[in-house]
Amino acid sequence: MTQAEITVLGWGVGLLFAYGAVHLGGLETIRLLRPGGIRRTAFGLLFTFWGLAVLHLLEIALAAGLLAYLLADPANGTLTEGFGSSAADYVYFAGVSFATLGYTQLEAQGAIRLLVMLLSLSGFMLITWSATFIYTVWGEAFRD
């Protein structure tokens, strides 16, 4: 492995670990802030859904920032032609990689591919975790 690949892989693993902590903290925050008197109503479920959406957007923003940081060094690789360098471009690429296991019309070239692979794995794991969480909240709302 090249030095750039080791660096990008290290950042990707760090992102995966950070996501675990951020996501757990986010789920606990959502659980604690859910309105107590109306936990068993549709609003409690909507609050959970909205909280998860904000949490995932935050996670995508973290990845977009890391992508921008790493792609500032050409040794870390590039994205295919047509990729701009605006914040919206980074958020788009990070979001699509996070939510679709990396199926974008852009292709990562060079060491940055390793970060995109870990971003896709992270997205799959976090979306699954969120789905399990909201399924549990749904069950609690209608259990009795």
Image (cartoon, rainbow, N blue to C red):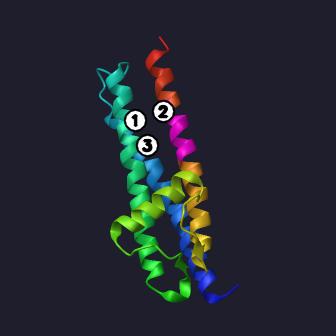
The residue lying at 39 percent from left, 44 percent from top is 53
- Residue 93 percent across, percent down from the top left: 47, 63
Q: Is residue 18 left or right of residue 26?
A: right
**Mark 1 crowdedness (10 Å alpha carbons): few <14, some 14-19, many ≥20:** some
SS at mark 2?
helix
Q: Name the residue beneath numbered marker 2.
A: 134
Magenta segment = 127-134
Q: Are marks 1 and 3 in contact (CB under 8 Å)?
A: no
Query: How far apart, in angstroms, are the residues tagged by discs 2 and 3?
Result: 10 Å
Q: Are marks 1 and 2 in contact (CB under 8 Å)?
A: yes
Residue 42: quadrant of the picture: top left
Query: How far apart, in angstroms, are the residues tagged by discs 1 and 2?
Result: 7 Å
Which residue appears farthest toward the front when viewing the image? 82
Which residue appears farthest toward the right when viewing the image? 1
Q: Name the residue beneath numbered marker 3.
A: 27
- Residue 101 percent across, percent down from the top left: 60, 55
**Mark 2 crowdedness (10 Å alpha carbons): few <14, some 14-19, many ≥20:** some
The residue lying at 46 percent from left, 28 percent from top is 137
Q: Name the residue beneath numbered marker 1.
A: 49
Q: Nearer the viewer, residue 88 or 119?
A: 88
